[in-house]
Image: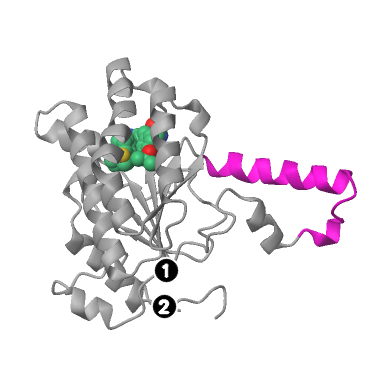
Amino acid sequence: MFTKRRKMNEEGAPVTKEEVLRRPIPNHVAIIMDGNGRWAKRRALPRAAGHYEGMQVVRKITRFANGLGVRVLSLYAFSTENWKRPKGEVDYLMKLPEQFLTTFLPELIAENVKVQVIGHTEALPDHTRRAVEKAIQDTSGNTGLVLNFALNYGSRAEITAAVQQIAKEVERGALAPEDITEPLISSYLMTGGLQDPDLLIRTSGEIRLSNFMLWQLAYTELWFTDVLWPDFTEQHFLEAIAAYQRRDRRFGGV
Ligand SMILES: CC(C)Oc1ccc(CN(CCC(N)=O)C(=O)c2cnn(Cc3ccccc3)c2-c2ccc3sccc3c2)cc1
């Protein structure tokens, strides 16, 4: 018995924005942005150059996704735990967000983008956390694209915290065990109000989820590319959406 093996990434003629706009645009696109370090290494540049370039791509793809009508863009800066990095690199990384927000926040506000964060910002240095909180505050009333950063985020920890919270509610009699349904659990996750991702993109050739949104990705189309994040372009983004549009989603049905 054959199963029609779908290629992970249908290759074809370069798809155009117009073609993509003729079909449904995914509401929620999640991206595991991976490959900054390798990009720098291949060019014999310091790793910071890869992070800086990666940040420019975040700006470009955010603008492009907003223009296409994507409703939520979740970004996971896939990074080995910070403690594994040289100190200088971590210090640099924690300065990047302020640079990003200082130069980009006015544009995000003008574009009606709403900045949100999932994960643990308390672990960020004060100056970084204040910049992030200001961005969240200054865009909280916006109704356009939700730009959702996963910072110091882990899916199993997120699910565990939700289970603990629900157990406390049951213990105090506010919930009965039969009240615990999938929608209820979803509402206790950090992504509470957001719809599940329709499309997940991961760059740099790793085919793993890396403890990212494990509950939320249950029916998400997964699209992997060898392209390193700093080399990721609008054209790659269009290819991923076109691949999503070609796939008929089953949501667990046959
Ligand atoms: C609202 C937003 C702007 O606030 C933020 C506050 C703190 C952070 C730092 N950070 C969280 C802590 C952790 N996981 O290390 C990262 O995710 C991290 C780890 N590598 N890179 C380089 C990289 C850059 C670009 C793409 C992938 C990785 C980043 C990083 C640093 C600055 C920027 S700016 C836009 C994205 C981004 C990502 C991030 C955002």
Q: Amino acid at mark 1?
A: Asn
In x, y percent, where is residue 92?
Answer: 27, 24
Q: Residues within 10 Å of mark 2 (few under 14, many from 20)?
A: few
Whether residue 204 appears in this view of the structure is no
Whether residue 186 appears in this view of the structure is yes
Q: How is the image coloured?
A: one colour
Q: Residue furthest right?
A: 173
Q: Quadrant of residue 53?
A: top left
Quickly name the residue at label 2.
Answer: 2
Residue at (57, 78) in percent of width and height:
253
- Distance, label 2 to label 1, CA atoms, is 33 Å
Is 48 on the left-hand or right-hand side of 95? left
**217 in relation to 14, above or below:** above
Q: Amino acid at mark 2?
A: Phe
Is 101 on the left-hand or right-hand side of 3? left
Q: Is residue 24 magenta?
A: no
Residue at (23, 41) in percent of width and height:
103
In x, y percent, where is residue 5?
Answer: 36, 72
Which residues are drawn in magenta?
154-180
Q: Residue furthest top?
A: 87
Q: Nearer the viewer, mark 2 or mark 1?
A: 1
Quickly name the residue at label 1.
Answer: 27
Q: Residue furthest left?
A: 43
Q: Nearer the viewer, residue 112 or 82?
A: 112
Q: Give the secondary structure at mark 2.
A: loop
Q: Quadrant of residue 225?
A: bottom left
Residue at (90, 49) in percent of width and height:
173
Q: Give the secondary structure at mark 1.
A: loop
Q: Are marks 2 and 1 in contact (CB under 8 Å)?
A: no
